[in-house]
């Protein structure tokens, strides 16, 4: 075999090797592309399942909260006593499930809570009177106030019972579930 023939043979083998490599690379690319598409489809399905699972968890959490929810109702809110010990007495009843009172607060310049009530447990049908003492001399009819009774249910869901009034008159009663706040760093 002569040098030109050898060169032609090497070129032919190189061309065949190049074409074979190119065909192999294309086939691998097609296989990898199919794998990538399959993985994308699996990811899409898992994402959809994750969304459904999240919704199911929310529904279960809501059902548990509803099953364990306390339901406070206002019995009365009246001033009583004799100066200097005039007291606003707010009587409530729990018509729902067991609740643990975690904090009481009054928004009024003329009143302060007499007895803090952390960890007071109110069972179904229990009644309790929260007391706030007058600290400013003013006619009780002119004292505007908002009382807050924060409490939790069996699952530690948080609630606020808010009573707003002036003197012996109650203007508004609201019982709210307090949504959990998600803090981001």
Image (cartoon, helix red, strand yellow):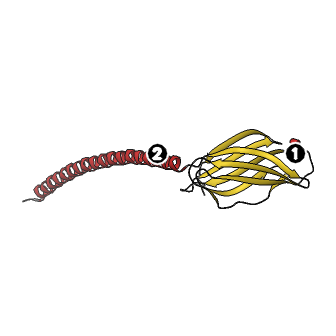
Up the image or down, 72 lies above or below 13; here it is above
What is the quadrant of the C terminus in the image? Answer: bottom right
User: Which residue is rendered at x = 39% and y = 47% of the image?
Assistant: 47
User: Which residue is rendered at x = 69% and y = 44% of the image?
Assistant: 74
Give x and y (percent) for residue 176: 63, 45
Q: Which residue is mark 1?
A: 140
Q: Which residue is mark 2?
A: 59
- Is residue 110 or residue 62 the one in the foreground? 110
Which element type, helix, strand or loop, lies under badge 2? helix
User: Where is residue 170, by image quadrant?
Assistant: top right
In the rendered structure, the answer to whether residue 170 lies left or right of residue 24 reads: right
What is the quadrant of the N terminus in the image? Answer: bottom left
Give x and y (percent) for residue 149: 69, 52
Which element type, helix, strand or loop, lies under badge 1? helix
Give x and y (percent) for residue 33: 29, 47
In the rendered structure, the answer to whether residue 99 lies left or right of residue 86 reads: left
In the image, farthest residue toward the top: 171
CA–CA distance in space, label 2 to label 1: 46 Å
Looking at the image, tell me whether mark 2 or mark 1 is earlier in sequence order.
2
Residue 158 seen in this snapshot: yes
Give x and y (percent) for residue 26: 24, 48
- Is residue 104 or residue 15 the one in the foreground? 104
User: Which residue is rendered at x = 27% and y = 49% of the image?
Assistant: 29
Question: What crowding class fits label 1: few (fewer than 14 Cα within 10 Å), some (14-19), or many (20 or more)?
Answer: some
In the rendered structure, the answer to whether residue 70 lies left or right of residue 128 reads: left
**Foreground label between 2 and 1:** 1
Residue 109 seen in this snapshot: no
Number of on-image labels? 2
């Amino acid at each position: 075999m002569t040098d030109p023939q050898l060169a032609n043979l090497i070129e032919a083998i190189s061309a065949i090797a190049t074409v074979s490599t190119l065909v192999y690379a294309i086939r691998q690319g097609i296989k990898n592309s199919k794998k990538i598409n399959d993985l994308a489809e699996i990811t899409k399905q898992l994402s959809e399942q994750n969304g459904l699972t999240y919704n199911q968890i929310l529904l279960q959490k809501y059902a548990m909260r509803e099953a364990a929810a306390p339901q406070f109702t206002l019995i009365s809110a009246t001033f009583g006593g004799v100066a200097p010990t005039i007291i606003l007495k707010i009587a409530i009843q729990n018509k729902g499930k067991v609740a643990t009172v975690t904090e009481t607060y009054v928004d009024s310049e003329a009143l302060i809570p007499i007895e803090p009530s952390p960890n007071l447990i109110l069972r179904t049908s229990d009644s309790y009177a929260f007391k706030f003492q007058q600290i400013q001399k003013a006619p009780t009819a002119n004292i505007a106030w908002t009382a807050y009774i924060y409490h939790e249910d069996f699952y530690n869901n948080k609630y606020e019972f808010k009573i707003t009034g002036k003197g012996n008159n109650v203007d508004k009663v609201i019982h709210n579930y307090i949504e959990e706040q998600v803090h981001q760093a």
